[in-house]
Image (tube, helix red, strand yellow):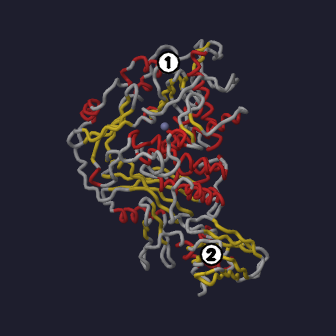
């Protein structure tokens, strides 16, 4: 049996190869096609004669597909052109990413975010999670004051705004004046919204109309939900990033005496310099300000704070230079050198990093502070829920960017870096070999913690080992810079608050396509790195190099550009023949297996070529070719040796 050459049909076939093929054909409108296995991923079925779905039409069609009513709105939260994301330009620069937030009766539905990707207004991919069929009374909520009283009663500990030493350290200026704007940052902020308990399913009956507060004690941060109708507590969840588990030990000055790098501040009438920089970062030592008359900071008793302050400035450079992100460290407070506090943590609601000590080692190290600041990066992008698999991804991204920051800073100073976390104090984790610290290096493998019931918010600091190992393996093949860009794109584009490990797999594949091209070697490496840690899918769309070309040209133009290819017999046994419509000066045939991995590549100079198949396991393969510098229609072939 011969595979018939497609002519005009090429356009539709190429595009639909990317899609899950369970769509109802013959519809008048474009429709959203749900992925067969992974429920957060959707594609737009495109057929000949059917209008493409444009951004303008997305909201009404999406609302209908997800069961959203007239009470629901989808508001644009963020728009990104891929070129704006990082200093290295994307292969896919024209793609635009739009994030929508769901509102119900005007109130935010927490974590209900959907993302579209379009090129020239035509939507290609959709991902995220919305809640349809809500039927919730949002009339006459109780007052914020009444709700706050209930919320405060549900939290134990000393509230941070009641701790005068800490408040003085953070919010007292050089002349001893108390800054009330600073102080107000630490007071609980209430918001009316629709939310569920962390860990509960994302379904309408788990969602309540609540007052949501973020409440800080001197040691932790809590997200408290108070039912806005009846005034009862609905949920209390600790959300301090690393609040109980992150550890580090640091003697400061692991990087020697560094001149002209740490940015400090002295007011016009002041006599002394203090640890404050132009990004709004302030650093204190156990709640006290550290000052210097000479702008020399060599007192070893102050080293936890001065080192941390140097590091936060270096981190700002890292994000600015590598990712065009000028604001990531802005207004971050660091309280370093807290004695008898065996922890480092990030408190999102007031953007504070708290750093203690362990085994007589201060935790002011590059990778630990880099890790904590990376939690802010996650909060401001994918905002992964700090629970279960999404929490493990959150932790892993913090390790990834903490380590990439260490690499950047140490390399700039002619020093060595490594894949362990916290080693300047006490080593906490290894990205190259997570097993060394009892973390899994394989999805659901040894040391894996049950995300639903395990401690540490469902094993966030343990199950992070799987993505850490993925990132390490990927870096071995395409280098840490490119791997870092993939991670950065995943966070900013494809991951949403409820994403899990399989979403991360898909997100990274799309990110690699955006960055390096649809059939790039980097894309294959991303997939094989996931396979090496036990995360794989037979449903990753085939790579099809001329798919993007098809997007950009009319059907007639494609007809003029393409060389056609016939593949036969199909199924093939022992040998498969590939015949081109034109004489070839030079061509490349690539063969991909059903997981998108390239398994063979053949250079050809003849109009027809035969390829032995005995070295290939039986299964479905994609044949992809470039000939005379032009794209060729691709074809699937079943090999049955
Ligand atoms: Zn963390």
Which residue is found at the position 47% from the left and 26% from the top?
Answer: 342
In the image, residue 469 sits, relative to residue 535, either above or below, namely: above
Q: Secondary structure at mark 1?
A: loop
Q: Secondary structure at mark 2?
A: loop
Q: Would you say residue 319 is visible in this rendering? A: no
How far apart marks 1 and 2 lie (CA) works out to: 67 Å
Tell me where residue 228 appears, x and y as whole percent: 25, 42
Q: Earlier in the sequence, mark 1 or mark 2?
A: 1
Which residue is found at the position 31% from the left and 37% from the top?
Answer: 236
Q: Nearer the viewer, residue 604 or 113?
A: 604
Crowd rating for badge 1 (residues with CA inside 10 Å; few <14, some 14–19, many 20+)? few
Q: Nearer the viewer, residue 411 or 517?
A: 411
**Quarter of the image that includes the N terminus:** bottom right
Which residue is found at the position 44% from the left and 61% from the top?
Answer: 38
Which residue is found at the position 39% from the left and 32% from the top?
Answer: 221
Please tell me in which quadrant of the rendered image residue 593 appears.
Answer: bottom right
In the image, residue 503 sits, relative to residue 162, either above or below, namely: below
Which residue in the structure is indicated by mark 1?
A: 173
Tell me where residue 82 appears, x and y as whole percent: 59, 54
Q: Do the CB atoms of the residues marked 1 and 2 lie less than 8 Å apart?
A: no
Tell me where residue 98 appears, x and y as whole percent: 49, 55
Which residue in the structure is indicated by mark 2?
A: 634
Q: Nearer the viewer, residue 284 or 73?
A: 284
Q: Is residue 255 left or right of residue 375?
A: right
Tell me where residue 374 appears, x and y as whole percent: 53, 39
């Amino acid at each position: 049996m011969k595979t018939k050459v497609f002519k005009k049909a090429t356009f539709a076939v190429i595009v639909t190869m990317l899609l899950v093929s369970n769509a109802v054909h013959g519809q008048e409108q474009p429709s959203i096609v749900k992925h067969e296995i992974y429920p957060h991923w959707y594609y737009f079925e495109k057929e000949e004669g059917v209008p493409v779905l444009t951004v303008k039409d997305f909201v009404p069609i999406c609302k209908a597909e997800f069961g959203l009513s007239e009470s629901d709105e989808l508001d644009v939260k963020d728009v990104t052109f891929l070129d704006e994301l990082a200093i290295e330009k994307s292969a896919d620069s024209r793609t635009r990413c739009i994030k929508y937030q769901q509102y119900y009766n005007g109130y935010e539905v927490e974590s209900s975010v959907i993302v579209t990707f379009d090129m020239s207004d035509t939507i290609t991919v959709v991902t995220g999670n919305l809640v349809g069929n809500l039927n919730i009374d949002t009339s006459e909520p109780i007052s914020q004051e009444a709700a706050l009283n209930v919320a405060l009663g549900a939290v134990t500990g000393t509230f941070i705004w009641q701790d005068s030493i800490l408040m003085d350290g953070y919010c007292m200026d050089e002349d001893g004046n108390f800054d009330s704007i600073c102080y107000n940052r630490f007071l609980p902020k209430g918001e009316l919204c629709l939310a569920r308990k962390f860990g509960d399913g994302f379904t309408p009956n788990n969602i309540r109309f609540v007052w949501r507060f973020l409440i800080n004690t001197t040691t932790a941060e809590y997200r408290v939900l108070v039912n806005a109708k009846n005034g009862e507590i609905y949920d209390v969840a600790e959300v301090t990033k690393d609040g109980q588990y992150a550890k580090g030990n640091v003697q400061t000055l692991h990087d020697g005496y560094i001149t002209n790098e740490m940015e400090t501040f002295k007011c016009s009438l002041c006599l002394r310099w203090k640890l404050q920089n132009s990004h709004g970062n302030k650093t204190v030592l156990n709640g006290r300000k550290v000052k210097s008359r000479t702008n020399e900071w060599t007192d070893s008793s102050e080293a936890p704070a001065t080192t941390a302050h140097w590091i936060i400035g270096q981190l700002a450079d890292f994000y600015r230079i590598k990712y065009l992100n000028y604001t990531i460290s802005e207004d971050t407070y660091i309280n370093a050198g807290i004695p008898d506090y065996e922890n480092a943590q990030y408190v999102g609601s007031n953007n504070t990093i708290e750093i203690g000590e362990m085994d007589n080692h201060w935790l002011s190290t590059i990778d630990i502070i880099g890790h904590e600041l990376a939690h802010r990066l996650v909060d401001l992008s994918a905002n992964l829920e700090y629970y279960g698999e999404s929490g493990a991804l959150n932790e892993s991204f913090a390790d990834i960017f903490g380590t990439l920051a260490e690499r950047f800073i140490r390399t700039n100073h002619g020093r060595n870096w490594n894949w362990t976390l916290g080693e300047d104090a006490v080593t906490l984790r290894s990205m190259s070999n997570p097993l060394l610290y009892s973390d899994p290096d394989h999805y659901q493998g040894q040391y894996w913690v049950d995300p639903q019931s395990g401690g540490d918010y469902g094993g966030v600091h343990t199950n992070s080992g799987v993505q850490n190992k993925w990132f390490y393996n990927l870096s071995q093949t395409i280098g840490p810079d490119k791997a870092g860009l993939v991670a950065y794109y995943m966070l900013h584009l494809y991951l949403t608050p409820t994403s899990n490990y399989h979403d991360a797999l898909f997100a990274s594949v799309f990110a690699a396509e955006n960055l390096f091209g649809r059939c790039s070697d980097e894309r294959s490496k991303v997939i094989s790195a996931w396979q090496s840690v036990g995360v794989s899918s037979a449903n990753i769309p085939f790579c099809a190099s001329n798919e993007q070309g098809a997007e950009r040209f009319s059907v007639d133009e494609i007809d003029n550009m393409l060389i056609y290819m016939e593949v036969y017999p199909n199924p093939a046994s022992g040998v498969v023949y590939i015949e081109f419509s034109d004489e070839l000066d030079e061509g490349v045939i690539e063969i991909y297996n059903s997981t998108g991995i390239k398994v063979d590549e053949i250079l050809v100079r003849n109009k027809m070529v035969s390829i032995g198949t005995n070295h290939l396991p039986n299964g479905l393969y994609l044949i992809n070719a470039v000939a005379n510098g032009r794209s060729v229609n691709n074809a699937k072939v079943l090999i049955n040796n």
